């Protein structure tokens, strides 16, 4: 993956990723962009923004393929050109990012303490309590400044916006919940946007990252860690940690039936450990892990 125009002494320790699909208008400011959570030394977390430069060949491929156009870009034949680094005091312990424009996004802080504050982070993880020790949060950067839009999250993790940008999905790992929020844009004044809780989806498992279905905007896939202590063991001692992928069929309106949760896969961990994300692509279930050096491609069982 070529990375161009990097600043001097650029350091990349990537975590969450998001693509803003752009408009394919030919205007550089509207071309697709890759947003990357970056963990720098000394507890400094940033969002790095790269412009995805489409070659004439990839534009030709986009024109030919409706599916690829929906997804935004053919990532195999593109350069990533560094555009800017976003820093803010609200970036405490970034985990994931969801792009909403060429330089606007939501992002999660999984904890209220930075990565080096190991004892505080342990307290946040081990002591239940929605308010006192739940210090994860969600921030929104509007192109000028970053503001907290959600606080008191028990490890805010994966984040995604609906294709029409009306809803925000937030995975709260230690609560085994997904929060679905309406995004309230206030164009009448310069005030930050706000969120209204529409639904809390109980999953019974440690939810990590989201993948929107490429065709159905009401379907969301989630990679999960069903046994969080096993995940910690996997991270430290490289032991197995189970993998689980859920398919969420989202409620279409507040008055419709609530969202439903279906388990697509539950694996012991020997084949692939600690799934962080998964989803159906061209009829195949693809599972990607946090640490394992491979991905898993599964053919759904025909009953
Ligand atoms: Ca994550």
Image: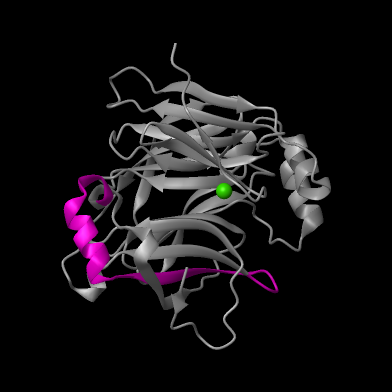
Pick out the residue farthest to the bottom: 8
198 left or right, relative to 90: left
Spot occupied by residue 229 in the image (x, y as percentages of width and height)? 77, 36
Look at the image and say whether residue 127 sits in the magenta stretch: no
- Seen at 28% across and 55% down, the residue is 72
Residue 163 appears in which quarter of the rendering? top left
| Vertical placement of residue 219 versus 88, above or below | above
Name the residue located 67 percent from the left edge and 47 percent from the top edge. Answer: 292
Q: Quadrant of residue 130?
A: top right
Q: Is residue 102 above or below residue 214?
A: below
Residue 130 against residue 86 in the figure, above or below? above
Question: What is the residue that sits farthest to the top in this orientation?
Answer: 303
Q: Residue at x 28, y 44 (%)?
A: 166
Pinpoint residue 80: horizontal percent, then vertical percent.
40, 72
- Horizontal side, residue 148 vs residue 83: left or right: right
Quadrant including the C terminus: top left
Quarter of the image for residue 227 reads: top right
Between residue 114 and residue 162, name the one nearer to us: 162
* Residue 127 appears in the rendering: no
């Amino acid at each position: 993956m070529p990375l161009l125009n990097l600043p001097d002494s650029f350091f990349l320790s990537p975590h969450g990723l998001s693509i803003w699909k752009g408009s394919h208008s030919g205007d550089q400011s509207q071309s697709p962009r890759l947003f990357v959570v970056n963990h720098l030394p000394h507890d400094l977390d940033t969002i790095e923004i790269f412009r995805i430069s489409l070659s004439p060949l990839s534009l030709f491929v986009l024109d030919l393929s409706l599916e690829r156009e929906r997804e935004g870009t053919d990532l195999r034949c593109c350069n990533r050109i560094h555009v800017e680094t976003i820093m803010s005091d609200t970036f405490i312990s970034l985990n994931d990012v969801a792009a909403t424009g060429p330089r606007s996004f939501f992002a999660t802080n999984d904890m209220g303490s930075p990565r080096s504050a190991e004892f505080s982070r342990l307290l946040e993880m081990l002591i239940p309590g929605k308010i006192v020790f739940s210090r994860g949060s969600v921030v929104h950067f509007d192109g000028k400044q970053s503001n907290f839009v959600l606080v008191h999250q028990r490890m805010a993790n994966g984040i995604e916006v609906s294709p029409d940008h009306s809803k925000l999905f937030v995975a709260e790992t230690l609560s085994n919940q997904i929060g679905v929020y309406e995004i309230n844009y206030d164009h009448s004044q310069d005030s930050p946007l706000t969120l209204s809780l529409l639904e809390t989806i109980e999953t019974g498992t440690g939810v990590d990252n989201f993948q929107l279905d490429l065709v159905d905007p009401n379907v969301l896939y989630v990679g999960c860690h069903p046994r969080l202590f096993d995940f910690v063991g996997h991270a430290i001692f490289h032991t197995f940690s189970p993998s689980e992928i859920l398919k969420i069929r989202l409620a279409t309106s507040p008055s419709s039936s609530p969202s439903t949760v279906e388990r697509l896969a539950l694996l012991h961990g020997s084949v692939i450990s600690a799934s962080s994300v998964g989803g159906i692509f061209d009829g195949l279930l693809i599972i990607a892990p946090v640490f394992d050096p491979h991905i898993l491609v599964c053919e759904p069982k025909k009953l």
